[in-house]
Structure formats: C-alpha cells, structure tokens
Image (cartoon, rainbow, N blue to C red):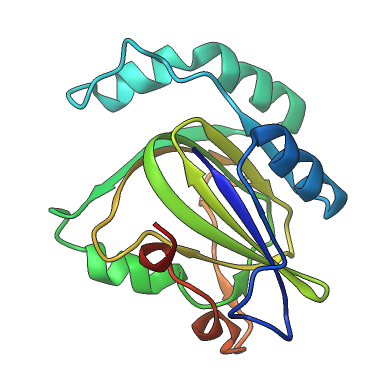
Amino acid sequence: MSQLFVYHSSQPKQALKVLNHAEDISSTLAQAGVRFEHWAANPALTAQSTHEDILAAYAADIARVKQERGDLTVDVVSIDEKHPDKVELRAQFIDEHTHSEDEVRFFVSGRGLFNLHINEHIYAVLCEKGAFLSVPAGTQHWFDMGEHPRFTALRFFNNPEGLVAQFTGDGIAADYPLLDDLV
C-alpha cells in the first residue's frame, strides 16, 4: 500500500502527517499540483511476465494517459537487487534535481520513494504496486529505490530522449529518510 509522509522543510525528522489511503494521498498531492492515482493491479502478470506482456496488460490505461498528456513513448523499467548497475542507478537520482518535463511513473510491482520539495514542504511518496505518480516539470525532487531495489514501472515520456536530471546542488535529500528507513 502506498503512503504519503508530509514534512515541513524545517523539521526533516518528524512527519507532520502520514496518509495511507489512496484518496487522501491523491487529494493532498493535488493541492500541491501533483497527480497521484491508484490503478487496479493486473492479476494476470507474474514475475516471469515480459515487458511486452506488461505493456499489453495496461494498454487501456497507457492509451488513456497518453491521450490526456500527449506522451510520445512508454517503456518498462525493471530493477532488482541482482541488477549489475543498481548502486549507480540509485546514486543517479538520490540527490535533489528537476526535469524539463513531467516525470510520470506507474508501479507495476515493488516500490520506490519519491520526495517532492514543494515550497516549505517535503512530500515523501512511497509508491507501491498500483501507484501512478506524475511529478510536474520543474518540481524539485529526488528518488530512492533502496539498497535492495525491487520494482517494475511504466515510464511515460514526452521526449523520446527521456528525462535529463538537472541537479539543484542542494544537499536537502540527505536530511530525510530513505526508502529503507520507511519500510
């Protein structure tokens, strides 16, 4: 089950609010300009499902989102603790950064932690199976997949080149709990 931890930027060790219901997470994030949905998981998918199987299983949702957003491409990313580049991949996005386009993810399985730095708050969104999150372009954020990653996600792109991180240089991410601290 996905969760939302809301912090004030002056108190990184104490969550002001912890939400566990998709509707509450969605409405709280919507107030901050962030889209969150919970999609029904496709029970036909297994650990052996291919990326093509996953794209086919979620074809209707993918088509809906692509039409709403005008996305050009969708792909599947799968990372687990056997991935040879897991350490480098984790380090790539664990510091605060922005993107020139929305960062849009749907978690087919597993989990990841998006921390959104919006005004004076940090919204730590623990995305688990069924979570759809759209982080608006220009939003300061960071992502942690944990020391022992395990997730499969759909990624939606407006730019076929994919997302390019523009790091803020702010060390704020080091002050907040990591994925492994929250689960």
- In the depicted view, which residue is nearer to us: 141 or 102? 141
Left-right relation of 60 to 178: right
Query: In this image, 39 relative to 47: left or right?
Result: right
Against 111, residue 139 (above or below) is: below
In percent of the image, x 83 and y 51: which residue is there?
33
Residue drawn at (57%, 22%), measured in percent from left and top? 62
Name the one closer to the observer, 82 or 128: 128
Residue 59's place in the image compared with 123, above or below, is above
Q: What is the quadrant of the C terminus in the image? A: bottom left
Q: Residue at x 44, y 70 (%)?
A: 178
Q: Position of residue 9 (x, y in %)?
A: 73, 80
Residue 65 position, x and y percent, is: 66, 26
Quadrant in which residue 44 is drawn: top left
Query: Residue drawn at (20%, 27%), measured in percent from left and top?
Result: 47
Q: Is residue 41 rendered to the left or right of residue 168?
A: left
Point out the residue furthest to the right here: 31
Name which quarter of the figure residue 148 lies in: bottom left
User: Residue 31, percent across and down?
Assistant: 87, 50
Tell me if residue 160 comes above or below residue 116 in the rendering: above
Task: Reply above or below: 147 against 154.
Answer: below
- Where is residue 137? Give x, y as percent: 73, 57
Left or right side of 182 for 142: right
- Tell how many labels: 0
